[in-house]
């Protein structure tokens, strides 16, 4: 995709100081390109460190290939950068370890996250990978809110939580997949027991 | 988002999963912990800190958690009163008080009880029995012996002085090993004669004007233990029984090292 056709995230020009008006180009794993302000990038610890390490000039940004983010798709990345642009310049919250952790979802974030659960899932993975603390907070809050008014049985269904028995079965299956011989030995043992043998060996 | 849609919570990155649990309110964290062993382990790993944790068991279960922002909620009222897994995988109805007190050693540590262990390991567990419909069948000596709480407050407890004498003797032999404070209220001044209560128990009467400071784990306040009768467990741990005639109440304090305050 050419730079001219890249989906540019809405930017509040007046809010950006002239000296900070540098835009980086990023490319998703499905080759969609985004221009993101330097200030917005600071919301992501991962990207901020990356661009600092690269030390690009304004010319580099235009002339060099867009920075590839290979494990996030364009739809998700667009949400991430929209969020970063809206919250640029805001302080990054410090986790005080409290439980329950109090998180409010601002109106903008609520609208941004008015998406299906599949995309919300990807958004959380992206926020985690890019280390965007406040985006993680609000997206996790949205997931936590799904528990409201639910019984444990309903929670199991909403969050797709396996029962103890299902966990055990999955664990056994994983073990057997790792060691197919174990299953054969077990079957042989059972067969010998049926035949009345006292010793396996 | 569509109503009733599903979300694969356990497939989130581990840190995001724990963050989500930490953002849930305590009521839902508790419900989550009851779903499976894995969920319980996750909640434990969240490391919720609390100074006090009170459980009231009656027709409903009420839980009061310390400084974590929850003051009162009712948990599992009928018809959703079951809490654990019984024999052959059947749902097991909660029965007070055994269902909360299962972390003692011995036969009841079988796996079927494990779901009943509250997951807030950092909190002190308080249990009060609240069964206002039947004042005369609240707790038996056997049930009292099963309680593994550090602080036991039993209202309207019906134990004869002989039974209490037996309880103290069993405590001396190692029963209720974690117990720090036992308070038993009697109805109709039935606290019993001290001679029966302490029969066969080697003890020392402490003058009423002698005060010792006591602090139970998980409590901020220091209690003044005035007078009473001292006796010892088989391993040397000291306890004191104090009678409060005005309120028809007996207190038993166990002087673990962390409970002894300089007076």
Image (spheres, rainbow, N blue to C red):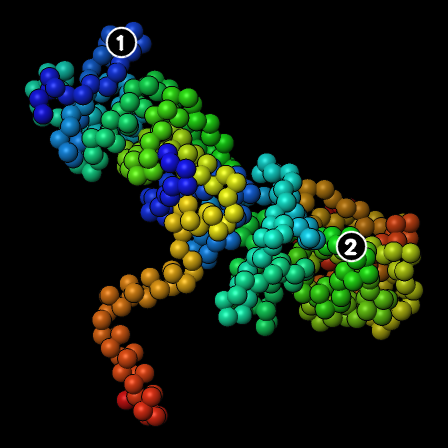
Image height check: is B156 above or below B70? below
User: Residue A68 appears in which quarter of the rendering?
Assistant: top left
Residue A104 vertical position relative to residue B227 in the rendered view, above or below: above
User: In the structure shown, which secondary structural element does the residue marked by tag 1 occupy?
Assistant: helix
Q: Is residue B190 left or right of residue A56?
A: right
The residue drawn where x is 28% and y is 22% is A82
Nearest the eye: B104 or A71: A71
Q: Write down the chain letter for disc 1.
A: A
The spot of residue B127 in percent (x, y) is 68, 53
Q: Is residue B28 left or right of residue B172?
A: left
Q: Determine whether B169 is above or below B60 in the image.
A: below
Quadrant of residue B166 within the rendered picture: bottom right
Percent of width and height locating residue B25: 52, 39
Which residue, given by chain and number where applicable, does mark 2 sit on? B133
Q: Mark 1 Cα within 10 Å, few/some/many (few <14, many 20+)? A: few
The x, y position of residue A200, in whole percent, is: 30, 88
- Whether pointer 2 and pointer 1 mark residues with C-beta atoms closer than 8 Å, the reply is no
Q: Residues within 10 Å of mark 2 (few under 14, many from 20)?
A: few
Q: CA distance from mark 2 to mark 1?
A: 70 Å
Residue at the location (85% across, 63% down)?
B204
Chain ID, mark 2: B
Residue B217 visible, this orientation: no
Question: What is the quadrant of residue A133 in the picture?
Answer: top left
Which residue bears the numbered disc 1?
Answer: A13
């Amino acid at each position: 995709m050419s730079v001219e056709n890249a989906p540019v995230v809405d930017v509040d020009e007046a809010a950006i100081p002239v000296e900070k008006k540098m835009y980086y180009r990023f490319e998703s794993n499905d080759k969609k390109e985004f221009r993101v302000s330097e200030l917005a990038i600071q919301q992501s610890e991962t990207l901020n460190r990356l661009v600092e390490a690269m030390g690009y000039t304004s010319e580099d940004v235009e002339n060099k290939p867009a920075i590839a983010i290979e494990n996030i798709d364009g739809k998700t990345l667009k949400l991430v950068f929209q969020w970063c642009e809206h919250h640029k310049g805001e302080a990054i919250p410090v986790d005080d370890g409290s439980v329950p952790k109090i998180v409010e979802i601002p109106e903008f974030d609520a609208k941004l996250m008015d998406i299906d659960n599949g995309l919300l899932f990807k958004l959380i993975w992206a926020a985690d990978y890019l280390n965007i603390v406040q985006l993680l907070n609000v997206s996790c809050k949205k997931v936590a809110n799904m528990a409201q008014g639910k019984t444990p049985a309903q929670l199991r269904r909403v969050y797709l939580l396996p029962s103890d028995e299902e966990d055990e079965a999955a664990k056994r299956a994983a073990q057997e997949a790792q060691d197919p011989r174990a299953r054969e030995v077990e079957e042989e043992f059972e067969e010998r027991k049926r035949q009345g043998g006292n010793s396996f060996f | 988002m569509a109503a009733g849609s599903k979300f694969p919570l356990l497939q989130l990155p581990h840190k995001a999963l724990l963050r989500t649990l930490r953002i849930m309110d305590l009521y839902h964290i508790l419900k989550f912990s009851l779903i499976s062993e894995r969920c319980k382990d996750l909640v434990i790993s969240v490391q919720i800190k609390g100074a006090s944790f009170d459980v009231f068991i009656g027709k409903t279960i009420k839980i009061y958690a310390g400084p974590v922002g929850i003051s009162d909620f009712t948990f599992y009222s009928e018809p959703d009163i079951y809490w654990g897994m019984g024999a052959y995988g059947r749902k097991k109805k909660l029965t007070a008080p055994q269902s909360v007190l299962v972390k003692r050693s011995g036969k009841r540590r079988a796996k079927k009880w494990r779901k009943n262990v509250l997951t807030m390991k950092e909190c002190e567990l308080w249990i009060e029995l609240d069964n206002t419909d039947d004042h005369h069948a609240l707790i038996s000596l056997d049930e009292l012996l099963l309680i593994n709480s550090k602080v036991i407050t039993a209202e309207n407890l019906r134990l004869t002085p002989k039974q209490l004498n037996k309880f103290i003797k069993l405590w001396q032999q190692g029963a209720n090993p974690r117990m720090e404070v036992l308070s038993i209220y009697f109805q109709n001044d039935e606290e019993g004669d001290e001679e029966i209560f302490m029969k066969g128990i080697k003890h020392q009467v402490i003058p009423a004007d002698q005060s010792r400071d006591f602090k139970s784990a998980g409590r901020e306040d220091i209690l003044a233990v005035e007078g009473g009768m001292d006796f010892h467990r088989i391993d040397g741990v000291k306890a004191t029984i104090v009678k409060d005639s005005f309120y028809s109440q007996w207190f038993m304090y166990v002087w673990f090292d962390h409970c002894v305050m300089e007076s």
